Image (cartoon, rainbow, N blue to C red):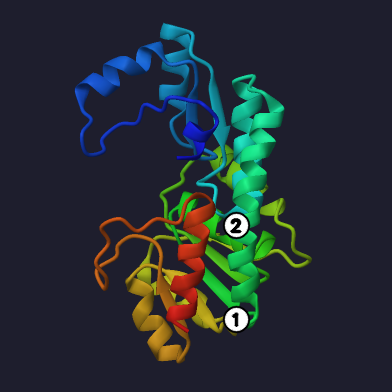
């Protein structure tokens, strides 16, 4: 929706109504957009080498006005779009989303939060919590099997950019027992994670919202957190579960 507002035609894979033809068309794209600080390096190189297609990499899914504005400006620069058009779209979206966030701020207190999920989900949610939502993430547990030291360093570098005085501890851990013990070692008031963390939150007597996979305690059909509209959904979910 946002990229189309910039005048771009978007070719996505593996969504309803698209298939092999979408993959074939990808060889004629003007730009590949990669939403990850470490994934798809092989595909990125293959498209550049075989088809001369450049890439724009944003570290994780953009959630909320700060990250989404940054993302759109990056796409605009990569595609050499009219800067006035890009800023017009950002301003229109920000006016609307900040009105919602201001209303939410009157009713929601600050929480000490533990975030659990894959790299993109954990990074995106934590970035929104600190930069836009005035919350305090204390610990972030990344469940991806990130093996290479360089990839871990790239991920940690993104957390260092958070606009918060005391950065959260970032842990790479996939074992459920150790995740539970790590969460219990902090004085948290909310956990944002998968269905697995619901039991831990219950033991601690604190709030929990399922924002990452696996998600077996809720039906998810068209529920998203990306962009401007997505951050409103995330706020609603955290408020509902408090």
Residue 98 position, x and y percent, is 64, 61
Q: Which of these two is toward me, 133 or 191? A: 133
| Vertical side of 46 occupied by 224: above or below | below
Q: Which of these two is toward me, 97 or 18? A: 97
Crowd around label 1: few <14 · some 14–19 · many ≥20 (10 Å): some
Residue 156 visible? The answer is no
Where is residue 117, by image quadrant? bottom left
Where is residue 174, by image quadrant? bottom left
In terms of secondary structure, where does tag 1 sit?
loop
Check residue 108 in the rendering and tell me which mark sits there, or answer none: 1
Q: Residue shown at 43%/31% (left/top)? A: 40
| Vertical side of 182 occupied by 65: above or below | above
Q: Residue shown at 68%/59% (left/top)? A: 131
In terms of secondary structure, where does tag 2 sit?
helix
Give the CA distance from mark 2 to mark 1: 19 Å
Count the numbered circles shown.
2
Q: Which image quarter is the N terminus in? A: top left
> Which residue is disc 2 drawn over?
96
Residue 68 position, x and y percent, is 59, 46
Check residue 90 in the rendering and tell me which mark sits there, or answer none: none
Residue contact at pointers 2 and 1, CB within 8 angstroms = no
């Amino acid at each position: 929706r946002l990229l189309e507002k910039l005048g771009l035609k978007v070719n996505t894979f593996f969504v309803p109504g698209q298939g092999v033809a979408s993959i074939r068309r990808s060889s004629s794209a003007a730009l590949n957009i990669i939403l990850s600080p470490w994934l798809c390096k092989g595909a990125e190189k293959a498209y550049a080498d075989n088809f001369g297609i450049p890439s724009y990499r944003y570290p994780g899914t953009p959630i909320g006005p700060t990250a989404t504005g940054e993302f759109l400006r990056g796409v605009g620069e990569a595609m050499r779009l009219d800067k006035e058009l890009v800023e017009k779209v950002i301003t229109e979206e920000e006016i609307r989303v900040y009105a919602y966030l201001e209303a939410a701020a009157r009713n929601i207190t600050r929480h000490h939060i533990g975030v659990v999920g894959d790299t993109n989900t954990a990074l995106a949610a934590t970035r929104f919590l600190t930069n836009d939502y005035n919350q305090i993430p204390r610990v972030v547990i990344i469940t991806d099997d990130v093996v290479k030291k360089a990839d871990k360093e790239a991920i940690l570098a993104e957390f260092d950019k958070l606009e918060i005085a005391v950065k959260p501890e970032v842990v790479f851990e996939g074992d459920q027992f150790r995740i539970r013990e790590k969460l219990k070692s902090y004085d948290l008031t909310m956990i944002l994670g998968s269905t697995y963390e619901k039991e831990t939150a219950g033991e601690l007597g604190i709030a929990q919202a399922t924002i990452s996979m696996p998600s077996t305690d809720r039906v998810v059909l068209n529920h998203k957190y990306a962009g401007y509209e997505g951050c409103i959904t995330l706020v609603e979910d955290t408020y509902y579960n408090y």
